[in-house]
Image (cartoon, grey):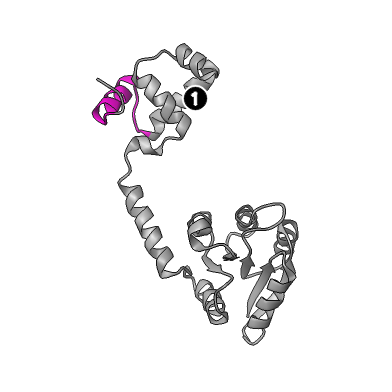
Amino acid sequence: MIKILLVDDHQMIREGVKKILKSEPDIKILGEAKNGVEAIDFVSKNEIDLVVLDITLPGQSGIDIMKSLLKIKSKIKILIFSMHPEDRFAVRALKSGAHGYLTKDSGAEQLVNAIRKIINGNKYISETLAEQLALEIYEEKFKELHEYLSDREFEVFLMISRGKKVSNIADQLNISIPTVNTYRARILEKMKMKTNVELSNYAVKHNLIES
């Protein structure tokens, strides 16, 4: 028996999902929740195989709730069931630990198929989303080192590469010297370098600063 927790703040949606799954003899909705607090409480007290989770809920977002649920029971499966199109949240949801993403305008058969596919150890995504994920993986593979830096880290990186002193960087960005040193340490780690000279040479080579 596939035991499911249904998490959605709209009763009409919950009733619709229950109606669809009622005809499946091996699927049982063990509980319902309207928000993250109720969902977390239910999962901590019950054995659940899969959570059908809305991504937009009052209080915590569905993504944050999902992370909390996975911390409580790492083997639980999560199917995001959302009114939002895939291109808005699906990739983020999957990267955060979701096992599938289904929009609420999908048919009843798709919902059942998604649940079964996830329970069998697979991810459930559309062909369009699969292509999007493949493209992101490809782009990630060919990223330049400086593209892994945050906006502020990149700003500090350019200043260091231009030979600015730590005290000058701190004054210009209105941050403390220890904070600048923390940024520098992160930059060196992310870019797999050890010295300011290496950073400067990299910046020149990639036309990020003038030589």
Which of the pair 116/125 is nearer the observer? 125
Res. 25 image quadrant: bottom right
Q: Is residue 152 above or below residue 46?
A: above
On the image, the x and y values in percent for residue 117 come to 50, 75
- Which residue is painted at 39% across and 14% down in the image? 164
On the image, the x and y values in percent for residue 88 come to 51, 57
Res. 30 image quadrant: bottom right
Q: Quadrant of the N terminus?
A: bottom right
Magenta stretch? 191-207
Q: Quadrant of the C terminus?
A: top left
- Which residue is painted at 57% across and 80% down in the image? 108
Q: Is residue 196 magenta?
A: yes
- Which residue is painted at 40% across and 34% down in the image? 190
Q: How many marks?
A: 1
Which of the pair 102/49 is nearer the observer? 102
Badge 1 element: helix
Is 81 on the left or on the right of 6, as rendered? left
Q: Is residue 173 above or below residue 92?
A: above
What is the three-letter code of the residue carrying label 1? Thr
What residue did someone put label 1 on? Answer: 182
Q: Is residue 141 above or below residue 181?
A: below
- Which residue is painted at 72% across and 67% down in the image? 10
On the image, the x and y values in percent for residue 160 come to 38, 20
On the image, the x and y values in percent for residue 40 come to 71, 58
